[in-house]
Amino acid sequence: MKEITIPQFELVYNSLSFGIAAMGAATLFLWLSRNMVSTAYRTAVTISGVVTAIAFYHYIRIFESWNSSYTVINDTITATGVKFNDAYRYVDWLLTVPLLLIELILVMRLSQAETTSKGLKLGTLAALMILLGYPGEVSADMTTRWIFWGLSMVPFTIIVLELFGGLKKAIDSQPESVRGLVNNARFLTVASWCFYPVVFLLPMLGMTGGAASAAVQVGYTIADVVAKAVFGIFIYSIAVKKSEAEASA
């Protein structure tokens, strides 16, 4: 385990606690509010809640792993020898990242063929991106980290291009009252996702020891809360607006 200071330990501790609260609250809100939208959009809202529920569970596990790796007695922090489990995040992302893209596609209510096609394409690319990133994340060798970072950026770039180019026609076909929200959800997805590769790069850009460990954990937590909990609220808002527009029509 990397040597860290008490403030660094507490910063990660509190950010993980915030992550647990945010994911848990978002899950309750999304599942309890799903009946506020029309039947056509309940699957998208339900999946949004599934995403935050999976993240809620994994944040509890990450929190427990972090606490078991260090002990703080008075003004002294000591590594226990229990390895912090970085794999929890990647297991979470492998499940939730494809679902994030699928819920965006579902709330747009495209044709069955287009929904299936785009869902399979983006979901597969998202899973590949996560699988390629993990070997670099757990490696202490900078060359290995750079190689797998570069490989994972290939499906990442394809996804971003699809979000901006491939979905433009679908966004233009949305009701005018929700077009802005859908577009904002698309931008939120890309912006929050761009934060992950930047955080991944921190140990490769000269940040070392406890500072790097704390920055990575806090950075990933911030990105997760935005990409899952905040994005889920966007999906719910789009579903409500589209339900209202369709009811009025």
Image (cartoon, rainbow, N blue to C red):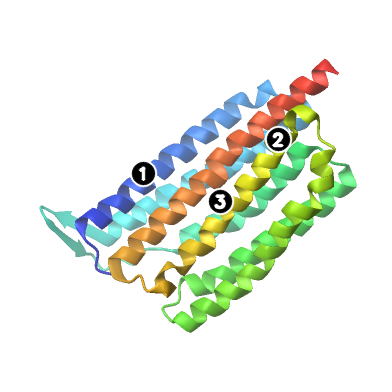
Mark whose residue sits in front, 3 or 2? 2
Mark whose residue sits in front, 3 or 1? 3
Say which residue label 3 marks. Answer: 192
What residue appears at the point 69 percent right and 25 percent down from the top-left corner? 240
- The 10 Å Cα crowd at callout 2, few under 14, some 14 to 19, many 20 or more, is some
Q: Are marks 3 and 2 in contact (CB under 8 Å)?
A: no
Amino acid at circle 3: Ser
Say which residue label 2 marks. Answer: 180
Cα gap from disc 3 to disc 1, whole angstroms = 20 Å
Amino acid at circle 2: Gly
Residue 156, placed above or below residue 57: below
* Coordinates of residue 226 in the picture (x, y in percent): 52, 44
Residue 43 in sight in this render: no
Which disc is residue 17 wearing? 1
Is residue 81 left or right of 148 when viewed as pictured?
left
What residue appears at the point 55 percent right and 39 percent down from the top-left corner? 230
Label 1: state its secondary structure.
helix
Amino acid at circle 1: Ser
Cα gap from disc 2 to disc 1, whole angstroms = 33 Å
